[in-house]
Image: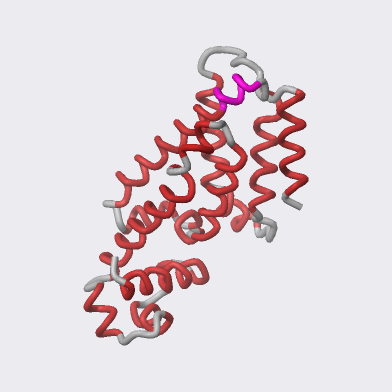
């Protein structure tokens, strides 16, 4: 990706986060990127082209900052992975605040998102089973429960910023998001797991 394209994408993400995707014109993005509209149109002939490029950029950042961190995943550093995911969501919150409408407008994005969702749930499952091995979580009380738990955690994480906005609360911090995960996991954590989670949260203060 050349520098101008990346500059446009970063400017677009910033404006989308502040005002929502549908409220931003190409001219607004060009102004924010400090380029002419004709230069913008040279790189992105339509807003659809830009949106697809933004989504590709999101996938690259997600892979680099979250899913690509194989060392943390292998070591079972679930809290670090979850924190990185919340930070990613915060950086691209426009998408998580308006996922349904964006997919309705740009349906070609749906396949990529579904792939991301499957990968995210699989990572959560793996981290939970690693936590069992480390003595941080109790063994699965009955078959299939931790599959459902992984999906519940994904739902909480994906819609964290959206539900905060709907409720009109201004506390959509990464730490608060981690606290909601702790509440979901609490019944399944061992004493060692609860101590570890509490210590991690305290160190974020």
Is 112 rendered above or below residue 140? below
Q: Residue furthest front?
A: 71
Residue 112 in the image: state x and y as whole percent.
Answer: 32, 46
* Residue at the image point whose x is 31% and y is 87% from the top: 36
Comparing 120 with 65, the one in front is: 65
For the stretch drawn in magenta, what is the main secondary structure?
helix
* Residue at the image point whose x is 58% and y is 36% from the top: 78
Q: How is the image coloured?
A: secondary structure
Left or right of 186 in this view: 146: left
Residue 6 in the image: state x and y as whole percent.
Answer: 35, 69
Magenta stretch: give its range. Answer: 128-134
As for residue 2 lying within the magenta part, the answer is: no
Residue 7 in the image: state x and y as whole percent.
Answer: 38, 73
Residue 34 in the image: state x and y as whole percent.
Answer: 39, 85
Q: How many marks?
A: 0
As for residue 129 lying within the magenta part, the answer is: yes
* Residue at the image point whose x is 38% and y is 52% from the top: 59
Is 139 rendered above or below residue 117? above
- In which image quadrant can residue 161 be found? bottom right
- In which image quadrant can residue 24 be found? bottom left
* Residue at the image point whose x is 56% and y is 36% from the top: 153
Q: Residue furthest top?
A: 142
Is 142 rendered above or below residue 170? above
| Quadrant position of the N terminus in the picture | bottom left
Left or right of 134 in this view: 2: left
- In which image quadrant can residue 152 be found? top right
């Amino acid at each position: 990706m050349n520098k101008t394209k990346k500059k446009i994408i970063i400017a677009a993400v910033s404006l989308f986060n502040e005002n929502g995707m549908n409220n931003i014109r190409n001219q607004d993005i060009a102004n924010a990127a400090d380029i002419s509209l004709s230069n913008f149109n040279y790189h992105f002939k339509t807003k659809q082209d830009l949106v697809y490029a933004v989504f590709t950029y999101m996938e690259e950042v997600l892979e680099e900052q979250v899913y690509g961190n194989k060392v943390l995943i292998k070591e079972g550093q679930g809290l670090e992975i979850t924190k990185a995911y919340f930070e990613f969501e915060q950086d691209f919150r426009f998408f998580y605040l308006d996922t349904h409408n964006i997919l309705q407008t740009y349906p070609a994005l749906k396949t990529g998102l579904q792939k991301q969702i499957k990968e995210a749930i699989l990572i959560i499952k793996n981290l939970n089973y690693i936590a069992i091995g480390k003595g941080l979580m109790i063994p699965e009380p009955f078959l299939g429960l931790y599959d459902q738990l992984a999906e519940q955690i994904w739902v909480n994480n994906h819609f964290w910023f959206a539900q905060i906005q709907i409720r009109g609360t201004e506390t959509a911090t990464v730490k608060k998001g981690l606290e909601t995960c702790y509440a979901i996991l609490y019944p399944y954590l061992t004493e060692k797991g609860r101590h570890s989670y509490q210590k991690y949260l305290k160190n974020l203060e």
